[in-house]
Image (spheres, rainbow, N blue to C red):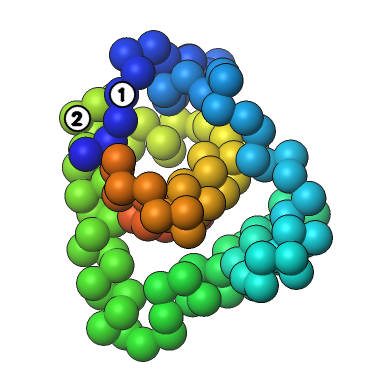
Amino acid sequence: MIKDSGARREFKTGAVRDVAEGEGRCDLLPLGILADRMKTPILAFIEDYVRYGDPCSLWFALDEFIGKMPEQWCSALLEVSKQYEEGAKKYSDRNWEKGIPVHCFIDSGVRHYLKWRRGDDDEPHDRAFIWNMLSA
């Protein structure tokens, strides 16, 4: 289940998302340095995407997170489709395609990744991380 604060931020494009104020700005963290400290290349790949804009970096991050075998991807995508379903109920179909700044996806995605690593189970942080990386 996707958490819902009930408060929304609306973008000029008409897209909406839950408010993020007070949650921190994970997109501003020094991800490359933290990747070394935390022994995870995922954050380094995300940092590369932020700095250089090469979408291959996000695919590398997802391969590292999901695995490289087709059956691993199939399982992950079936789970992530639930995120799309719940998002459509919360906002509208394809709301994310209307135009949300990339930093919002990176911010949310990194936050979900860190919560997943920490073991938080208040929502499916693994699938939320994947959804945000696919959307960026």
Res 71 label:
none
Callout 1: SS: loop
Q: Earlier in the sequence, mark 1 or mark 2?
A: 1
Give the CA separation, mark 1 to mark 2.
11 Å
Note whether residue 62 is visible. Answer: yes
Number of the front mark, 1 or 2:
1
Give neighbour class at mark 2: few <14, some 14-19, many 20+ (Cα, 10 Å): few
* Residue highlighted by disc 2: 89
* Residue highlighted by disc 1: 4
The residue under the point 59% across, 45% down is: 106
Residue 45 percent coordinates (x, y): 67, 66
Note whether residue 56 is visible. Answer: no
The N terminus, quarter of image: top left
42 and 8: which is toward the camera: 42
The residue under the point 78% across, 50% down is: 30
The residue under the point 62% across, 30% down is: 24
Q: Given the current orientation, which residue lies at the most extreme top position?
A: 7
Query: For the residue marked with disc 1, what is the amino acid?
Result: Asp
Residue 75 percent coordinates (x, y): 23, 72
99 and 40: which is toward the camera: 40
Callout 2: SS: helix
The residue under the point 25% across, 26% down is: 90
Residue 123 percent coordinates (x, y): 29, 43
Q: Is residue 55 above or below residue 113?
A: below
